[in-house]
Amino acid sequence: MPDRKAHNPDWPWAEKFRISQAVQVGDTVHISGQGPLDPQGNIVGNDDMSVQSQQVFANLRAVLAEAGATMDDVVKITCFITDTGRYAEYSAARAEAFPNNIPASSTVTVADLVLPGMLVEVEALAVLGSA
């Protein structure tokens, strides 16, 4: 059985949630839901779906880098948004984040997310070397 390895950027706020930002088993990297948080744990883009989505994908890139992966290795994402009417803003940020290898994608509308003010959260699955 392949080894299991956690990957965590050096984000001080992450300790209080007691989760791994990513867990790698073999060549597969399972990335926890990434929110629109800066490295200090502050929500960015107050009520701005576009800015929050860009931050989410920046955080996803940081977690992937810890595992030696890139956005091109992502094969599946699941997005949770709080307002379907603002989907186009998220979709534009997603298109910008994945200019090459477009992953499979699902989007789910939810009533709210774990932190007040969060409009978007994205979890991902990456396979190293799949690009």
Image: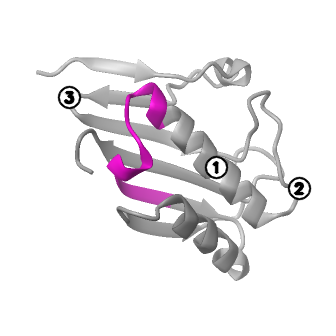
> What colouring style does the render use?
one colour
Q: Is residue 111 magenta?
A: no
Q: Mark 2 highlights which residue?
A: 46
Q: Is the residue 99 above or below the residue 118 in the image?
A: below
Residue pointed to by mark 1: 56
Q: Nearer the viewer, residue 20 or 49?
A: 49
Give the secondary structure at mark 2: loop
Q: Nearer the viewer, residue 106 or 130?
A: 130
| Residue 96 relative to residue 13: left or right | left
- Left/right placement of residue 1 relative to residue 35 reads left
Q: Residue 36 in the image: x percent, y percent?
A: 72, 47
User: Which residue corresponds to mark 3?
Assistant: 26
Foreground of the two, 102 or 2: 102
Asked if residue 74 is among those painted magenta in the image, a careful observer would answer yes
Q: Residues within 10 Å of mark 2 (few under 14, many from 20)?
A: few
Say which element carries label 3: loop
* Amino acid at dot 3: Gly
Answer with left or right where residue 28 lies relative to residue 96.
left
Relative to residue 12, is residue 40 depicted above or below? Answer: below
Q: In this picture, which residue range is highlighted in magenta?
A: 64-78
Q: As shown in the figure, which amino acid type bears the numbered disc 1? A: Val
Which label is found at residue 4? none
- Which image quadrant is residue 77 in? bottom left
> Residue 113 appears at what percent x and percent y?
69, 52
Q: Position of residue 3 (x, y in %)?
A: 22, 17
Count of marks overlaid on the render:
3
Work out whether mark 2 precedes mark 3 in sequence or the reverse, and give the earlier one: 3
Q: Earlier in the sequence, mark 1 or mark 2?
A: 2
Residue 72, horizontal then vertical, whole percent? 37, 51
